[in-house]
Structure formats: C-alpha cells, structure tokens
Image (tube, rainbow, N blue to C red):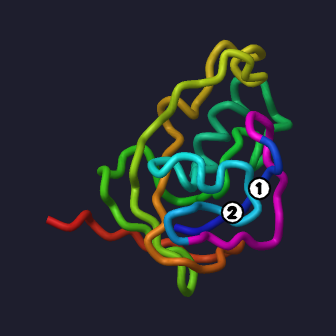
Amino acid sequence: MKVVAVSVSAHKGVKKDNVPEIRVLLDQGVENDAHAGFDPKRQVSLLAQESIDIMKAQGLPELRPGDFAENITTSGLELHTLPLGAVFRIGPEAVLELSQIGKTCHHGCAIKQTTGSCIMPTQGIFGRVVKEGPIRPGDTIVIEPPAQ
C-alpha cells in the first residue's frame, strides 16, 4: 500500500492540484488546504486509485488524482472497506485515524453530471490527524486495526 499522489486546493468545491508534499497538522488537516480546520471528522480526504480507475472505465479516461478533491490518492487497498477507527501510518511520521466513510456529493459535481454517478459518496474516506508529519507520493501506508 502506498501513496500515489498528494493534493491541495486554495478553495472548496474544486479539484485539487497535485504537489510534491503535504504536511498534516494535528486536529487540523492538510496545511495550506481550503478544508484545513473546517470539519473535525473530515480533516484529510483519501481515495484509492483503483476507485478513480472505475470512473475512468465509465468514459472519463482523463481523470487524475485530485480530481475528486481528495488530499491523498492511494494504491493497493480498498479504503472504503476499512473499519471506522482504523489507524493509518503514512510515511515516516504522519498518523491518521479513519473518521468517516463516504460523503454527500455536491449537486454541481462535474463528475456526476458527466457520468451520472460519483465514487466519493461510497468510496472516499476521511481521516483525523493524530500525529503530524509530511506525506509524499511513494510513501508506504500501514493500516493498524482500531483500538479495542
């Protein structure tokens, strides 16, 4: 399991731009991202490349990481199948806790208008930052079970 891309945007409701590195801040989210500090349950958004590939196969071959406004695009794991409370260790320092699975899709979502569906409501996940640190493409992801 690894990080494929990391992305930020200065405004809400738009695609995110891929960047070489993000830094997650304790109980805030992604530094310099429009969503930082906005919602304690949805500090950092994650989506699997495998989910993006599903939408590509539905007629949107130009889709890329960040187009669903996710901060972290991953590979090698069906994120939406993890239990709430699962802990993600990403790269050398950062730690996230799975706080929400899915979200309500915006009515004006360009992806939904084009294909009639969107994957974020069912396959996007959100994490709460429990340990700060940088995250870069290529970083490994280790999933730990939720504390009992």
The image quadrant that residue 100 belongs to is top left
Residue 122: image location, x then y, percent: 47, 31
Residue 31 is left or right of residue 119, and the answer is: right
Tell me where the magenta segment starts and ends, as one range. Answer: 12-25
What's the residue at 75%, 14% (across, down)?
A: 113
- Secondary structure beneath label 1: strand
User: Taking 61 as reference, is 145 above or below it?
Assistant: below
Residue 27: image location, x then y, percent: 50, 64
**Disc 2 + disc 1, Cβ < 8 Å:** no
Q: Does the magenta stretch include residue 14?
A: yes
Mark 1 neighbour density, 10 Å: few (under 14) some (14–19) many (20 or more): many
For the residue marked with disc 2, what is the amino acid?
Val
| Residue bearing mark 1 | 8
As rendered, which of 57 and 122 lies closer to the eye? Answer: 122
For the residue marked with disc 1, what is the amino acid?
Val
- Secondary structure beneath label 2: strand
Q: In which quarter of the image is the C terminus?
A: bottom left
| Residue bearing mark 2 | 4
Mark 2 neighbour density, 10 Å: few (under 14) some (14–19) many (20 or more): some
User: Taking 53 as reference, is 90 above or below it?
Assistant: below
* Number of numbered markers: 2
